Amino acid sequence: MSDCGVEPVAYKHLAHDLGCHARMAWVSQTVVNVGSRLKRVIHRGRVCRQRSHTTCAHGALERRTVRAISFPGGGILFWWQLGVVQSLRSEYERSGAQIPLVGASCGAFSALMLACGVDAFDAYDSVCDLVKRHNVLERGPLGLYGIWSRLIEEWLDELLASRNDVEARLASANMEIRVLHLLDLSRARGSSAQYHVLRRVAGGMFTERAVSHFVDRHDAIQACLASAHIPFFIDGQPLKRFRSDLWTIDAYAFQHPFAVTWSGTTHSHVGETAQVLAIPRRDTLFIHHELDGALAHEIKKQNRYGASVLMSDDQLQFVHLLIASGMEYGTRLKQTISFEIDEAYCS
């Protein structure tokens, strides 16, 4: 036995296991970064066209009518989205909380926060407590590896449980959570035939579904985790099993963010399907960081990557900056939009 009390053979096995986990985490991070960069390169033209619909020739935001809000993915820039949500929440509540919401990847959490009326700074304070409680920063850059899903679930459950009206809000909200799942596995099980295919992603390898009509907060949280499942990194598993018959993955880096629009096709926990009218892109307000020029300048100045899953000592300070930046964008935005409820779009 060695001086430290560990058998040399056991130590070698331990070192080998840690090395394997580190390599898997590195692969996950590489896939996320490469996917994010490819998305920016391939869809830059689409982003510019969407921005042209949002801004006028002088760069000011145009006044427009909004019938739905879309929250595409964006990694850590979820916190920028949450800042926008903080600014738009009063307008959303004034509409009777009936404006359709759709979220994908980290945007699913933003849609859930808006639907449930969660305060951005309450969410920030809660995540700070969670990071300290679990010593995440002390774990190094890979501090979230393998435990991220569990921490998110704990964080959201604490936030939503503190509100007495969450169940009622979820029951009345018009919210879609988008999930992507492997087509072959679903065909093998045969039970996912009830789910309507919205589109096929990555050459048909994945199919996209819209999930709604959540039975409780736990069901809604699991839907968000299914939409944002990063293989291996988030919980050590390649896929996320959701509602017993869908094996999901976060592959939204393979499609441009402005494809995430309200479909009107919703699926309940028991498989019941409701079909109403889809909302066109022109009537959808996209809450996406690439439309905020001020944020893009700040990220470039700080040399940050929005999709990064690596932890750093100043991560929480950067998160606070993102919330503030999102609130500034949301303040400008709400001066130029008006929410309109169209009964034809509501189930």
Image (spheres, rainbow, N blue to C red):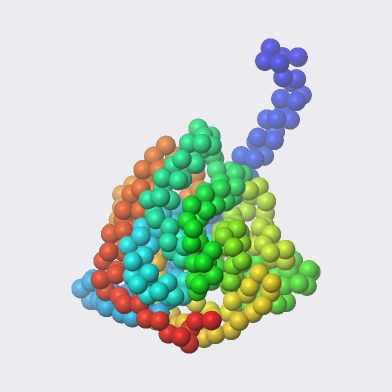
Farthest residue toward the front? Answer: 164
**Horizontal arrangement in the rendering, residue 321 relative to residue 116 (left or right):** left
**Residue pictured at 72% horizontal, 63% vertical:** 244
Q: Is residue 191 above or below residue 282?
A: above
Would you say residue 218 is visible in this rendering?
A: yes
Farthest residue toward the left? Answer: 58
Q: Is residue 104 above or below residue 27?
A: below
**Residue pictured at 42% horizontal, 37% vertical:** 313
- State the residue in front, 128 or 283: 128
**Residue pictured at 52% horizontal, 86% vertical:** 277
- State the residue in front, 316 or 233: 316
**Residue pictured at 69% horizontal, 59% vertical:** 241
**Horizontal arrangement in the rendering, residue 19 relative to residue 167 (left or right):** right
- State the residue in front, 285 or 272: 272
Q: Position of residue 7 (x, y in %)?
A: 75, 20
**Horizontal arrangement in the rendering, residue 228 relative to residue 50 (left or right):** right
Q: Is residue 124 above or below residue 344?
A: above
- State the residue in front, 105 or 340: 340
| The N terminus - image quarter | top right
**Picture quadrant of residue 86:** bottom left
Q: Position of residue 290 (x, y in %)?
A: 37, 64
